[in-house]
Amino acid sequence: MRNVIKAIQQYKSFLIVGHYHPDGDAIGSALALGMSLKKLKKRIAVYNRDDVPYNLKFLPGIRQLTNIFPAAKFDCAIMVDCAQPKRISKEFADAVESKTFKALICIDHHLLDAPVGDIDCIDPKAASTGCVIWSLLKKMRLNKSADIANLIYCTLTVDTGSFRYSNTTAAVFDLAAELLREGANPWLVARNLEENNPVVRYRLLGLSLKSLHIGFNGKFASMDVTREMLQTVEAHEDLSDEFANYPRSIAGVEVSALYREMKEGQIKISLRSKLKVDVSKITKQFGGGGHKHAAGCIIHADLPTAKLQIENAVGKAL
Ligand SMILES: [Mn+2]
């Protein structure tokens, strides 16, 4: 963190980036950092390859986010909630490869074998990347802002599943209280994150729930989202992002899977577990990643083949 602060003081321009298919932690962290560096009169751009999900459009400063890779040069690039340039975008990975930046900083809370930054600020104990950013901003005395408090509060809500997951520690509640004192508004964040769904999401959920499959003596449950379902209700696949939690919420289920047909011959799998099974070990077998209780991968096959492969691996893990 000391080295990150040094770099922030030393350099004049910063490109702040988060992983594609962004969540509230990637976007909230990037915006909070961007807003703070602006206060220091740094030239900044905040970039994400993909569009902002509908439930994150309320975030303060969201207009500073661009999905067009900036042509301008920057002294320093800061990756947040991600430690691999290729998970930002091809343009970004190319820029890193061709040594466009004087320094590459990585601020994250995922454990990775070999982070690639010149400066890696990774805290696997942090509930969200936003928590790491908040510590950084406090050290730099840039934390007195209700907007930044709301952004960090959003990262915390998203990555702890609204203060429910096993990463919800006493420190998380301490931090939440601190953010509230700085002006974060829990109902504003919750209302926009969770009570702002388009009706078509529920029509899609209705179709997907019909595909509910229970296996391994009730320890496994899965749901599908097919191209046909998406076409029937005219929905975008992003609307099914949280569906993986439904099969896990069934009594007795230890592992759940959501199978999403991306395009012909490409299935995106989201795995969830409740207690013992480390689903990231399963997704890694298929070139994916994630956490113990939530992980994902993509299998290049048709839906029945992908299901067979996943269920074989899940069966062994169970
Ligand atoms: Mn995160």
Image: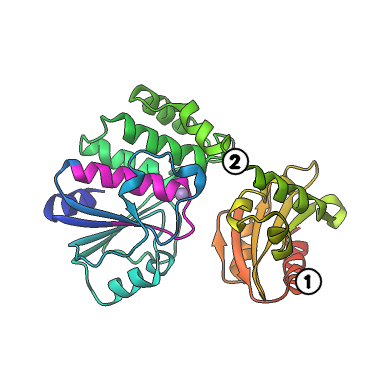
- Tell me where residue 268 sits by quadrant: bottom right
Say whether residue 160 is visible: yes
Residue at 38% in and 28% down: 179
- Image quarter hosting the C terminus: bottom right
Q: Is residue 305 above or below residue 27?
A: below
Q: Is residue 315 magenta?
A: no
- Tell me where residue 13 sits by quadrant: bottom left
| Element carrying mark 2 | loop
Residue 40 as seen in the image, left or right of residue 135: left
- Residue 7 x %, y %: 18, 54
Q: Is residue 157 above or below residue 290?
A: above
Residue 160 as seen in the image, left or right of residue 87: right
Of labels 2 and 1, the one closer to you: 2
Report the Cα–Cα distance between label 2 and label 1: 30 Å
Residue at 78% in and 71% down: 304
Residue type beneath disc 1: Pro
Say whether residue 293 is visible: no
Q: Which residue is mark 2?
A: 197
How many residues crowd around disc 2 within 10 Å: few (fewer than 14), some, or many (20 or more)?
some
Q: Which residue is mark 1?
A: 304
Residue 187 as seen in the image, left or right of residue 211: left
Q: Is residue 4 above or below residue 134?
A: below
Q: Main secondary structure of the magenta part?
A: helix
- Residue 94 x %, y %: 32, 75
